[in-house]
Image (cartoon, coloured by chain):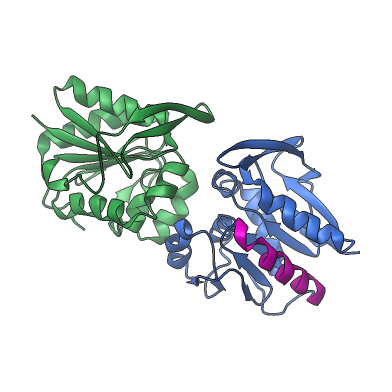
Chain colours: A blue, B green
């Protein structure tokens, strides 16, 4: 059985966590919500705070070695918090080092800049962080889903069906030698 | 009488607009709130939506030539919106072109990346956007207030007293030949 980590904290866009989680669980796979602290995290939904979601384990307890893939939901405040946490950034970087699939949507790719893994990669994101990704060396394109050697990215909640489908494909393919940190 | 523009939209950190506004008005100066659309904008306060503030005029109506300086408050969602608006970015860039003082606090400096005015400049910001500013060519330092040739920056609401004081100093000095776009 595949095991997938979703790394998120307060302010994650609710549908960008629940929709991929459901799609992955339908495959019979296990999805863990990895947070910065034990307890629960609050979503962002329709322009306001949404529901609370229990964290499966913290990023200090979570070992990238135990997972087959990583998913990074968006929301503006979520990556704004994650990217200042060195343990979270190290956790992300380790998936790239191990050549494992990583999928990020909306503002999710923002954290990849701090993990220093976007140079030379083709990807997309919410348009507001385009310039930051380009300045970090990424080749930014405007498509509903972009797959570059096990790195799957999308722009916004509307892209979720395409995002989930490519994410599942990449997890089925497994490790990718060109995915690197 | 000096005239100062504060450019902001929904999600601006309330104290980062009200505190400099009050300090500037105490000097007998006029402060306009410039928004993306007519009407009002909602602040962000203590981790939630705060009060609504009337916009004096829109960025389409606002002429940088009519102002002596520009202030950019922070808040995560505020610049995330501003930086995707080409008219807002052009408005910001014009203050640099005219050598006028610009002050930005917290996530405020984020928009300066899109205005392409940070290369070679020494500045500070909320730490989450440090990497984006460095990748855009800025020299990021960790100080309560940084003044580099009419560009005044601070990290967070706690820095407001130092920020306001340097901002007033720079406005009194007027245009600066080394402030440029």
Residue A109 visible in image: yes
Residue at left offset 17%, top offset 47% = B64
Outermost residue, bottom side: A177
Q: Position of residue B84 (x, y in %)?
A: 39, 55
Residue at x 81%, y 44% (from the top left corner): A56
Q: Is residue B140 visible?
A: no
Tell me the quarter of the picture where residue B125 sits: top left
- Which residue occupies the foreground of this view, B32 or A67? B32
Which residue is rendered at x = 24% and y = 51% of the image?
B91
Q: State the image coordinates of residue A8 (x, y, percent, origin top left).
A: 68, 48
In the depicted view, which residue is nearer to us: A143 or B124? Answer: A143
Occupied quadrant, residue B106? top left
Say which residue appears at 77% left-offset and 48% top-offset.
A33
Task: Tell me: A64 left or right of B156.
Answer: right
A139 w.r.t. B36: above or below? below
Q: Does the magenta portion include A171?
A: yes
Magenta residues (range)? A157-173
Apparent side of residue B22 relative to residue A37 in the rendered image (left or right): left
In-front residue for pair B40/B23:
B40
On screen, B126 above or below B138? above
Instruction: Determine whether, in the image, residue B178 is placed left or right of residue B128.
Output: left
Whether the magenta-drawn stretch holds residue A84 is answered as: no
Q: How many marks?
A: 0
- In this view, which residue lies farthest toward the top? B26
- The quadrant of the image that shows the C terminus of chain B is bottom left
Q: Residue furthest front?
A: B39
Q: Is residue B15 above or below residue A85?
A: above
Residue B65 x/y as whole percent: 12, 47
Quadrant (top left/top right/bottom left/bottom right) for the N terminus of chain B: top left
Residue nearest the observer in this picture, B44 or B123: B44
Q: Position of residue B63 (x, y in %)?
A: 16, 47
Q: What kind of secondary structure does the magenta stretch mostly adopt?
A: helix
């Amino acid at each position: 059985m595949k095991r997938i980590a979703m790394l998120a904290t307060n302010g994650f866009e609710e549908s960008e966590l629940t929709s991929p989680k459901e799609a992955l669980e339908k495959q019979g796979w296990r999805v863990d919500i990895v947070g910065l602290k034990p307890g629960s995290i609050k979503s962002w939904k329709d322009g306001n705070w949404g529901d609370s979601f229990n964290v499966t384990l913290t990023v200090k307890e979570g070992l990238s070695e135990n997972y087959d893939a990583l998913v990074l939901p968006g929301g503006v405040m979520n990556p704004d918090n994650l990217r200042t946490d060195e343990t979270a950034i190290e956790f992300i970087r380790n998936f790239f080092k191990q050549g494992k699939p990583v999928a990020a949507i909306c503002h999710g790719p923002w954290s990849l800049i701090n993990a220093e893994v976007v140079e030379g990669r083709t990807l997309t994101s919410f348009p507001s962080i385009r310039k930051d990704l380009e300045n970090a060396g990424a080749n930014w394109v405007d498509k509903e889903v972009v797959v570059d050697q096990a790195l799957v990215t999308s722009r916004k909640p509307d892209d979720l069906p395409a995002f989930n489908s490519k994410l599942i494909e990449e997890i089925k393919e497994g490790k990718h030698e060109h995915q690197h940190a």
